[in-house]
């Protein structure tokens, strides 16, 4: 059975201005590289649907959702945060990005795909229950997780975040939710300047110093994430897959390389085989220099879909 590759052309129409690092070209670079490497031949292409207000409302306050709809401009740019802008196509793209996580959830739980990769933008893990920030509007992975919990009736879900920036939005949405274990690794001292002190007992946060490199990253996964995941025994694993900790990406300075992303994906797949029949859903987050982003996604996806 083939894994799902969920994306939509609407996601490339969202743009936040000239020279903004979260640019439409990110998706094209990923898609082209996966195609060249033959990985798209190993996956089912799926168009991301539009998330509904009901689906968004499981992760976000209803008033916030309505306000974001109302803020969508008919022309030009509208700033919702100092570095987060809407153009006339942003709302549609954001609905596709969140809808991708919902579609992935439905497919994997129904047994239509063993795993799924959502190649979408805008990203989501900085979006809090009532606030857009950090290039993010809706928290895509949180919408998917809550769909699995509240619609499909799952009771234990693990959310893994290896973006170089802490997923404060996901933490805000899931704080104290005993059905969700969130495991996060990030670089200390970077935006959003929090995460080093977990705000709930269901959070396993590991902040790493600048220039930590592969050994520290892998040790954090082995010593902190894996024991917590095994104790929790999740029924499904979601990944906020950010690739901006790569040594060629100037958004951070952890110094990771493609083999680190392949390695951490393999660790998570092994946990998934032990506890949740291999069910893993990955949603694209950060990664802003096109070549290392595309190469890192390919390393991640190759393991996610069992192409090795």
Image (tube, rainbow, N blue to C red):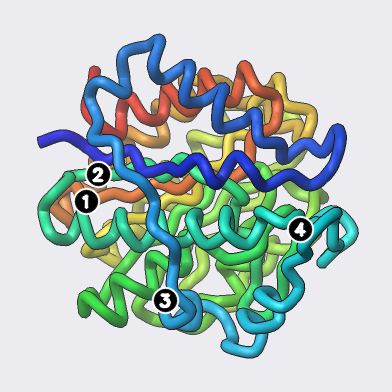
Of residue 87 and residue 118, the one placed in the foreground of this image is 87
> Could you say where residue 297 lies in the image, as x and y percent from the top left?
48, 28
- Quadrant showing the N terminus: top left
> Could you say where residue 56 lies in the image, as x and y percent from the top left?
49, 75
Up/down of 69 relative to 2, above or below: below
Q: In whole angstroms, how far apart are the C-alphas of marks 3 and 2?
A: 21 Å
> Could you say where residue 181 lies in the image, as x and y percent from the top left?
41, 68
Which label lies toward us, 4 or 1? 4
- In this orientation, does residue 2 appear? yes
> Could you say where residue 177 lies in the image, as x and y percent from the top left?
44, 82
Q: Secondary structure at mark 3?
A: helix
Which label belongs to residue 55?
3
Which label belongs to residue 115?
2
Which label belongs to residue 95?
none
Q: In whole angstroms, how far apart are the C-alphas of marks 1 and 3?
A: 21 Å
How many neighbours does mark 4 have within 10 angstroms: few (below 14), some (14-19), or many (20 or more)?
A: many
Which label belongs to residue 86?
4
Residue drawn at x 50%, y 37% as measured from the top left: 219
Which label belongs to residue 279?
1
Which label lies toward us, 4 or 3? 4
């Amino acid at each position: 059975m083939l894994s799902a590759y969920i994306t939509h052309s609407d996601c490339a129409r969202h743009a936040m201005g000239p020279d903004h690092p979260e640019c439409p070209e990110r998706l094209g670079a990923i898609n082209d590289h996966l195609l060249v490497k033959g990985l798209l031949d190993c996956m089912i292409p799926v168009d991301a649907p539009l998330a509904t207000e009901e689906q968004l409302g499981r992760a976000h306050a209803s008033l916030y959702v309505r306000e974001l709809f109302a803020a969508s401009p008919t022309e030009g740019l509208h700033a919702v945060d100092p570095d987060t802008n809407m153009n006339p196509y942003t709302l549609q793209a954001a609905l596709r990005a969140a809808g991708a996580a919902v579609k992935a959830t439905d497919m994997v739980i129904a047994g239509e795909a063993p795993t799924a990769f959502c190649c979408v933008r805008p990203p989501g893990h900085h979006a809090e229950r009532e606030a857009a920030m950090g290039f993010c509007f809706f928290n895509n992975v949180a919408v998917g997780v809550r769909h699995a919990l509240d619609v499909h009736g799952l009771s234990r879900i693990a959310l893994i975040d290896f973006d170089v920036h802490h997923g404060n939005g996901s933490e805000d949405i899931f704080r104290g939710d005993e059905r969700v274990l969130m495991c996060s690794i990030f670089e200390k001292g970077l935006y959003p300047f929090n995460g080093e002190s977990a705000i709930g007992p269901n959070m396993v946060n590991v902040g790493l110093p600048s220039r930590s490199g592969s050994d520290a990253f892998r040790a954090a996964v082995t010593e902190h994430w894996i024991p917590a995941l095994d104790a929790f025994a999740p029924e499904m694993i979601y990944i906020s897959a950010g690739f901006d900790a790569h040594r060629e990406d100037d958004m951070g300075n952890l110094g990771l390389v493609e083999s680190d992303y392949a390695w951490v994906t393999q660790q998570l797949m092994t946990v998934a085989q032990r506890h949740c029949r291999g069910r893993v859903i990955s949603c694209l987050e950060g990664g802003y220099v096109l070549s290392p982003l595309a190469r890192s996604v390919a390393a991640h996806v190759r393991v996610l879909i069992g192409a090795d």
